[in-house]
Image (cartoon, grey):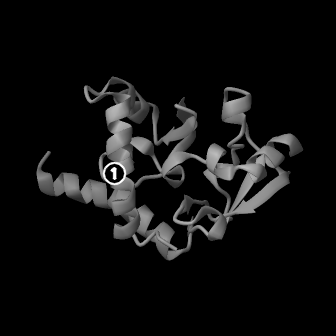
Amino acid sequence: MTAIIARRIFSRLVLMPLVLSFALGLVGTAGPAGAGVPIYIDFEGVAIQGYDPVAYFTEGRPMKGAEQYTYKWVGATWHFANAKHRDLFTADPIKYAPQYGGFCSRATYSSNLSAADPTVWRIIDGKLYLFGSQSALWRFDNDSVGQEGQIDKANANWPKLKAQYKLQP
């Protein structure tokens, strides 16, 4: 595959949807409680496709949240499986919110932004990392740089990506 074709595919499959998401306001940005934390949201303003961010920690698995248990934080509506999970999140949202605003952690490591699949995840050192696919997670688990090295690089890339895509509030 030539570089030109690869760029076209990347542009059509990754950049175009991402630019459209920004143009349509599908990325919420942080207010005072979470300054500098843009969140990837769907067309209805829901974070992480309606999955309960607390469930990853308390249940050890992704769980869909319910519309009756929601909390608005950093321009996004977060869904929870129950009132207890909502209250835990409300008390400390930074603890439970996914890293990199819910964008794919592997893509962030690679200096890109792409949507994550909330069913593909890891908790490392008490932080939730989402991935765009099982393939991205496999690469994260098996890269010679190691998980810590990838997280360090993604952490370094995140402020640059926020600035590049104007995700800062």
Residue 29 sits in quarter: bottom right
Left or right: residue 21 compared with residue 81: left
Q: Residue 51: x percent and y percent?
A: 69, 44
Q: Identify the residue at image location x=80%, y=42%.
A: 85
Q: Identify the residue at image location x=68%, y=43%.
A: 53
Is the residue 71 above or below the residue 1 in the image? below
Q: Residue 40: x percent and y percent?
A: 55, 58
Q: Is residue 55 visible?
A: yes
Given residues 1 and 106, the one toward you in this image is 106
Q: Residue 77: x percent and y percent?
A: 72, 60
Q: Identify the residue at image location x=80%, y=55%.
A: 70
Is the residue 106 above or below the residue 50 in the image? above
Left or right: residue 71 compared with residue 106: right
Is the residue 129 above or below the residue 7 in the image? above
Q: Mark 1 = which residue?
A: 156
Given residues 158 and 8, the one toward you in this image is 158
Q: Quadrant of the N terminus?
A: top left
Report how many numbered discs are placed on residues in the image: 1
Is the residue 108 above or below the residue 11 in the image? above
Tell me the SS state at disc 1. Answer: helix
Q: Identify the residue at image location x=18%, y=54%.
A: 5
Q: Is residue 62 visible?
A: no
Disc 1 residue type (three-letter): Ala
Disc 1 crowd, CA 10 A, few/some/many (<14, 14-19, 20+): some
| Residue sitting farthest toward the left | 2
Left or right: residue 23 compared with residue 29: left
Q: Residue 137: x percent and y percent?
A: 43, 31
